[in-house]
Amino acid sequence: MLMSSRSSKPVILVVDDTPENLALICNFLIDEYKVLLSSSGVRALEIAHSYPKPDLILLDVLMPDMDGYAVLKQLKADRRTSDIPVIFVTAMAGEKEEFYGLSLGVVDYITKPVHPAILKARVKNHLQLKLSQDMLSQQNLWLQQEVQQRVTAYQKAQDVTMRVLASLADARGDNEGGHHISRTRDYRDWET
């Protein structure tokens, strides 16, 4: 299961301007997750940039001052928060609104009133997907580093081989062959 670096449980940020909705969703999730609450979009952005970073955000769309769309746009525009999955939890049940949210990068859309089993299942699924994506990203980074190390080792071995061949050619009295090997090595170094 996905976990923030400090917490033993995954961290879920719930954003809603209605205290009753915050309490309700918190009660559904508190046994399995560390739940952070925010009643505004501005505060949600502050929390998303804090430590521990949320593993998932449940975000209301209709809020005063800064609506869920604006919060989502800012989260996705910032490299520090762009990888946090966001699920809209909203009373807006229109197809147009759902499509717009999905086009902005929301990963799922849950309509109110919230059904506990559906909420828990979707949260669990998106956390597992996020864990898989994070593991794949870490593996890709490791592979890139491994390839770079091997390329560097290969280039060093190739350089040593070229120097040995040039020295052997010089030692045998084949000055032109030794110079040719040295020029070839220098040309290869110039290309890379």
Image (cartoon, helix red, strand yellow):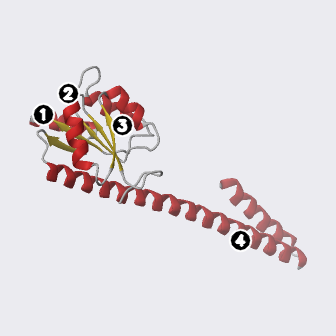
Task: Using the image, determine if residue 123 lies above or below residue 94.
Answer: below
Numbered badge on residue 76: 3
The disc, 2 or 3, on the residue closer to the chain's N-terminal end is: 2
> Would you name the residue on which mark 2 appears?
62
Q: Secondary structure at mark 2?
A: loop
In this view, the mark in front (2 or 3): 2
Which of marks 3 and 1 precedes in the sequence? 3
CA gap between label 1 and label 3 equals 23 Å
Inspect this view and state whether residue 186 appears: yes
SS at badge 4: helix
> What amino acid type should be assigned to the residue bearing mark 3?
Lys
Disc 1 residue type (three-letter): Ala
Most distant residue in the top direction:
65
Mark earlier in primary sequence (2, 1): 2
Residue located at (36% from left, 37% from top): 76
Other residues around mark 3 within 10 Å, as few (<14) / some (14–19) / many (≥20): some
Tell which circle, 4 or 3, labels the residue nearer the N-terminal end. Answer: 3
* Mark-to-mark CA distance, 2 and 1: 8 Å
Label 4 or label 1, whichever lies nearer to me, is 1
- The earlier-in-sequence mark between 4 and 2 is 2
Q: Position of residue 7 (x, y in %)?
A: 43, 51
Relative to 129, say whether 96 is above or below: above
- Say if mark 2 contacts mark 1, CB within 8 Å: yes
Amino acid type for the residue under numbered disc 4: Ala
**What mark, if any, has residue 157 been given in the picture?**
4
In the image, which disc is placed on residue 91?
A: 1
Q: CA distance from mark 4 to mark 3?
A: 44 Å
